[in-house]
Image: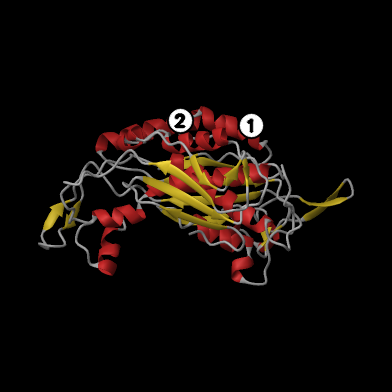
């Protein structure tokens, strides 16, 4: 369940069970979702350079099980279902060797069940398919209110795109991202990332990276400093860092902590009779409240812990050292992480705009 104040979004379903689900309560009445757009976002989550065999088994499409009547939302709980095609055979052997870097051993210490497969079911990134479906719906709702969101790959391993795209339209950036297999925005960086991923895959190793998420069109005044869970940055941080493999994030310019105060803070200017900022080092949020500038979030993802090269571990039953069994996986999942992060940001922002105190609150047909 995401941490929200107005929407209630529950993600359910086992990684290798019949399906994964997103259950949304309090979604406004009268909105007509574009299912083709949701299915396109689900497709994007499945692709990206460095993806592995599991994604070839899935062909994610959405079914609304409830909450839709004659093509629009009814304010009843929305149940969004995505079928799984990759499932465990019932005769599968138990897995008793935890993967370093995975939730396997930490969960074993908590629950004491020696078959590590059960922990993979709960911590697997497979359920992010349901997150993307929910986020895609919320992103459509936000776009109708002038708020647009894009997530793209800023870095993969040691290859990084340091270009500033803040002044470009989200629609332009989306076309650039979707044209590149790594979901980066620069053609040359895309080719460098592909070579880096290929080299890592040949060694049997994996790569992490960073995602830049840009939000445009969000008016000033969204959020609050009155409590931790009413702060815009706090809720975004809580929900984004709950994405599997996310290890941390930063709002705004990563160089600000190296700057002095006279350099780091966004100075005011007057442009055509309106107060504006000369820079956006803060990343669009000050004191937990949006300040009208684009929101800029950098999220860091660790490498995938399933390595085909093999990695030493310990059997929890025999306590002897063993090589971890290789579980089908990706060389990197940083490209789909852009789609998942975008979805989580959309859900969280919609939650804020549904607040009775929000200047954006509307319950009308769109």
Picture quadrant where residue 237 is located = bottom right
| Left or right: 344 as drawn, with respect to 286 | left
- The numbered disc on residue 84 is none
Which residue is at the far bottom? 226
The alpha-carbon separation of the residues under discs 1 and 2 comes to 16 Å
Residue at image coords 63%, 72%: 227
Relative depth, front residue between 328 and 83: 83
Q: Position of residue 18 (x, y in %)?
A: 34, 45
**Residue identified by numbered label 1:** 172
Relative depth, front residue between 251 and 144: 144
Q: Judging from the image, what secondary structure is the residue with disc 1 in? A: helix
Which residue is at the far right? 273
Q: Position of residue 143 (x, y in %)?
A: 67, 42
Relative depth, front residue between 181 and 136: 136
Above-or-below relation of 103 to 336: below
Above-or-below relation of 325 to 111: above
Q: Judging from the image, what secondary structure is the residue with disc 2 in? A: loop
Residue at image coords 53%, 62%: 3
Residue at image coords 63%, 65%: 231
- The numbered disc on residue 181 is 2
Which residue is at the far front? 70
Badge 1, how many Cα within 10 Å: few under 14, some, many 20+? Answer: few
Relative depth, front residue between 28 and 267: 28
Q: Earlier in the sequence, mark 1 or mark 2?
A: 1
């Amino acid at each position: 369940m995401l941490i929200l104040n107005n929407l209630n979004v529950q993600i359910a379903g086992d990684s290798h069970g019949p399906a994964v689900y997103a259950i949304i309560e309090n979604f406004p009445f009268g909105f007509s979702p574009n299912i083709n757009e949701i299915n396109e976002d689900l497709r994007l989550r499945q692709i990206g350079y460095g993806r592995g065999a599991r994604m070839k088994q899935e062909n994610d499409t959405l079914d609304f099980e409830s909450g839709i009547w004659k093509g629009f939302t009814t304010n009843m709980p929305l149940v969004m279902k995505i079928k799984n095609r990759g499932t465990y055979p019932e005769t599968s052997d138990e897995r008793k060797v935890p993967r370093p870097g995975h939730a396997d051993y930490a969960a074993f210490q908590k629950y004491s069940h020696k078959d590590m497969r059960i922990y993979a079911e709960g911590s697997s990134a497979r359920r992010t398919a349901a997150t993307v479906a929910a986020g895609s719906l919320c992103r459509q709702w936000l776009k109708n209110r002038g708020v647009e969101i894009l997530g793209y790959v800023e870095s993969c391993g040691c290859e990084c795109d340091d270009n500033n795209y803040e002044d470009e339209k989200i629609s332009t950036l989306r076309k650039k991202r979707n044209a590149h297999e790594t979901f980066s925005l620069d053609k040359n960086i895309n080719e460098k990332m592909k070579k880096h991923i290929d080299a890592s895959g040949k060694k049997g190793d994996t790569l992490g990276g960073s995602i830049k998420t840009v939000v445009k069109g969000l008016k000033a005044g969204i959020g609050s400093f009155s409590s931790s869970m009413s702060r815009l940055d706090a809720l975004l941080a809580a929900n984004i860092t709950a994405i599997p493999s996310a290890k941390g994030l930063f709002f705004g310019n990563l160089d600000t902590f190296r700057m002095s105060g006279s350099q780091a803070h966004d100075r005011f200017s007057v442009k055509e009779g309106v107060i504006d900022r000369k820079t956006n080092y803060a990343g669009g949020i000050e004191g937990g409240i949006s300040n009208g500038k684009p929101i800029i979030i950098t999220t860091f993802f660790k490498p995938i812990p399933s390595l085909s090269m093999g990695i030493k571990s310990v059997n929890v039953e025999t306590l002897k050292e063993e090589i971890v069994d290789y579980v089908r996986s990706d060389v990197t999942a940083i490209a789909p992480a852009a789609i998942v992060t975008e979805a989580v940001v959309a859900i969280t922002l919609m939650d804020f705009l549904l607040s009775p105190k929000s200047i954006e609150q509307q319950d009308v047909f769109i």
